[in-house]
Amino acid sequence: MVKLESRILDIDYQGVVLNIEDARKIGVLDGDRVQIVRGDKGLFVQAFVVTTKTILPPGIFGIYHKTNERLNSKDGDTFEVRHADRPGSINFIKKKMDNEKLNAEEMKAIVTDIVDDILSPGEISAFIAASYINGLDMDEIEYLTRSMVQTGESLDFSSHPIADKHSIGGVPGNKITLLIVPIIAAGGLKIPKTSSRAITGAGGTADLMEALAPVEFSSTEVARMTEKAGGVIVWGGATNIAPADDKIILYEYPFKIDARGQMLASVMAKKIAVGADLVVIDIPVGNEAKVTTPEEGRKLAREFIELGDRFGIRVECALTYGESPVGHCIGVNLEVREALSVLEGSDFPHSLIQKSLTLAGIVFEMAGKAQSGKGFEMAEEILKSGKALSKMKEIIAVQGGNSDVKSGDLKTGEFSFEVNAPEDGYVIDMKNKALISIARMAGAPHDKGAGIYLHKKRGQRIEKGEPIYTIYAEREWRLEKAIQEARQLMPVLVEGMLIDRVPSDYWRPPMKQ
Amino acid sequence: MVKLESRILDIDYQGVVLNIEDARKIGVLDGDRVQIVRGDKGLFVQAFVVTTKTILPPGIFGIYHKTNERLNSKDGDTFEVRHADRPGSINFIKKKMDNEKLNAEEMKAIVTDIVDDILSPGEISAFIAASYINGLDMDEIEYLTRSMVQTGESLDFSSHPIADKHSIGGVPGNKITLLIVPIIAAGGLKIPKTSSRAITGAGGTADLMEALAPVEFSSTEVARMTEKAGGVIVWGGATNIAPADDKIILYEYPFKIDARGQMLASVMAKKIAVGADLVVIDIPVGNEAKVTTPEEGRKLAREFIELGDRFGIRVECALTYGESPVGHCIGVNLEVREALSVLEGSDFPHSLIQKSLTLAGIVFEMAGKAQSGKGFEMAEEILKSGKALSKMKEIIAVQGGNSDVKSGDLKTGEFSFEVNAPEDGYVIDMKNKALISIARMAGAPHDKGAGIYLHKKRGQRIEKGEPIYTIYAEREWRLEKAIQEARQLMPVLVEGMLIDRVPSDYWRPPMKQ
């Protein structure tokens, strides 16, 4: 153990930098863990070590930004720094690698150490890989879900029921949240919607909403704004709700995996933490969606329902058409423009409106706001009457955005390229993954003006030379990369909406009403 | 793409630090990859990004030490920095996660990207976990082995055969290399032994040898010294021989796994790279060794032999007694003292001498230096005559150590604690893992004077109050931690040595003679 003076390193990384001499005294090597102790504040923080010979002299240690979020140190503070033991959670990860079941305590230990940055990237990644390969059973998924809830904040509301929706993703252009949330809130239900940013997609709902208003709020603010406006659309990553999930997703990202157990836990943990009583889950089904067959979709739906049941939450799942993009747009400003135009009264695109009203209608029926079979009509009335638009403006305002925004204010990038039909014919195929990849190459979601506009969808007649789709970019070299990527045919189809609806077998009155 | 000026960060880490504004211009976030281009030198180096708001201003980027080993930049150089694509090797790792077989090109891509620091810790760890869980078949192991050889340096010798030995580890106190290498070299065979440092053990052979001489040499120096002295004992990590292996081991380390496929590839890649024609492999078998049954040991032996055959190397494996430590000492100076005393003529400990002569004898028989069944005698003669001691001094000298060293010069730590028998009786059990853990707590292998001396071994009579073992440490708090760890009984046994010997079915004359 040695006493060292701190130097803050404003680099968005976790860990501490030790002079090699201090590291030797403590008995640690690069990659080992130390415990940083501040007795007067009762602080014990673990961190990974990197060593230096010259950047910092002996007696001074550097603290990276993410580690300092826990220590709240400033330059010149004094800490005891000592060798930290190997965390026990590593043994539980090893257990999962050896295909054994984890119990509640073991899962909790892993999740806690992920949240507290006690596990290294390599260790977390091994847990993800082991869970993906060996799978998690429903008990383990329950433990994982509960641990994710417990290691984060929860929202508390003055009245219930609280509604929520989730799309498991994998289909581009799925901007339905921008319609569903204002419709549900306008229908008198509270819906504190936390969304994600794009990971592998061309724009997450949080990325879309950010074109209209700030999306980064604390949990307390999310609850306050929801009480006020009835609904919000915020970025979950800023709330400290189920923070383990963001860290887990980081390590799934490179492999584009979305392991079933982690996905179930991640979705339900967030719903539990926001206090939801009833949840509708959108499961797009399609060759290139995350779920490729209706059978697989029904199985996943039953798992969501069972997991919800274990936590007293009523879940319904809607298997939706996921073969091709929802609506005609992919990319932040393009999608937001399309959603706003529907709120403003446009009856185009039909597929987007259809899907949004169906899902909102399910929520109204679950909450008893509409009779069975009448939810769609209720949602439609709210949309057509302009109540959904007013509610959306209210939501934008409560989040600090400009509520005077019009769909026409959302601009595409200045560089564009039209892909035209090479001959006459019907549009016969559409590749979601290719569309996403092209939109990302064009700069989405970082460049808000980047994306794709689809002039035609599958089944439509197109003449030689007519535009099939247009790529937009904010930067010329991005457009060139996207055009390169687009060296493959990408036609489009007319979407029938709901493939199936799986009702909950476990219906009971909302618990917290 | 932007042009940035470099600032070297002497922190033993890989990656670059970008001001957040430059990161936005390039279009990367924390954790993304950039390509650093120096057109005039034809350099293209990939690195991971961390961002800062204050440490570096826009226009300047920081280069961590390990990344700068590739760039060889100094402060103030100008580079183009641009977004780098996701490496294709990630798809092959995903393939392994999905339990598909990898072909030669795919394995090569993964290993190359590990060596070139193009894969992140999380990505490498997922590869390790997937290979551990799903396993590698013999073809994949061959591809992995070949890729490990090709991504590193190889030794070139003026004459053959070249001999080598390897212990797969897991048994404490296994200092036999310090005896075998000088015996084999004194017998007229060249043996360029590259060894490892302790990872989970209390002292690797490289740690032991370092108490006598420097162990860090380039591949060229290893070859030169071997030509001169007949043998060397160096740290493999410094040679750039099969460098992928060191990086893979890093990610196995936390989980204490030693995945079969990776172990086979790692061992054989090093033997191939040093140009070995014949190799003896020591497979300790015991409840707490890596291999727990003779059947498992024979299976592993056959795999080593088959893998060797695929590369034209003759392999024999010796299943040895791994239930308890080899000799009476664990820890750097204690073990080196014990080995030197045997070279100096001591006939104690019998078990250590027995095992070393057996393995050296196998090598002599494989090389045709001794008739079948006469290898042990030849090895014994070399040891008894003092030729092995002279050869060891020659090896110490050629590596730059003090060849006047005597066993008595190796000192134990100044703090010690004797564990005494609580009552009369026979020593009946011995836990390797507990012994290693205690030795590590005491400071081994970092503190060379730390370790354990075993006064008794299993089957020996001990009287109440007699010492069973003594713990040594260089620092008092380390001793206290070790004593805490030692709150469990730890008796000892008399070792019969070789359990079985598995000869090669694939014998043919050495290829490079």
Image (cartoon, coloured by chain):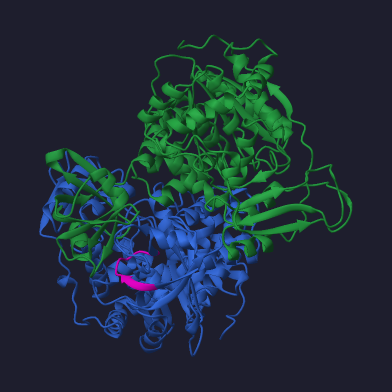
Chain colours: A green, B blue
For the residue pair A428 and B331, the one nearer the viewer reads as A428
- Is A97 magenta? The answer is no
Relative depth, front residue between B327 and B11: B11
Quadrant of the rendered structure where residue B52 is? Answer: bottom left
Q: Is residue B438 visible?
A: yes
The residue lying at 48 percent from left, 84 percent from top is B40
Residue A74, horizontal then vertical, whole percent = 19, 51
Q: Is residue A125 above or below residue B78?
A: above
Q: Position of residue B70 (x, y in %)?
A: 42, 75
> Which residues are the magenta region?
B5-15
The percent position of residue A32, horizontal first and vertical second, equals: 30, 54
Judged left or right of residue A162, residue B91 is right
Snapshot quadrant of residue A8: bottom left
Q: Is residue B195 in view? A: no
Residue sitting at x 48%, y 48%: A251
Q: Residue at x 68, y 30 (%)?
A: A353
Give residue A397's position: percent from left, percent from top. 45, 32
Left or right of A381? Residue B361 is left
Q: Left or right of A238: which side holds A367?
A: right
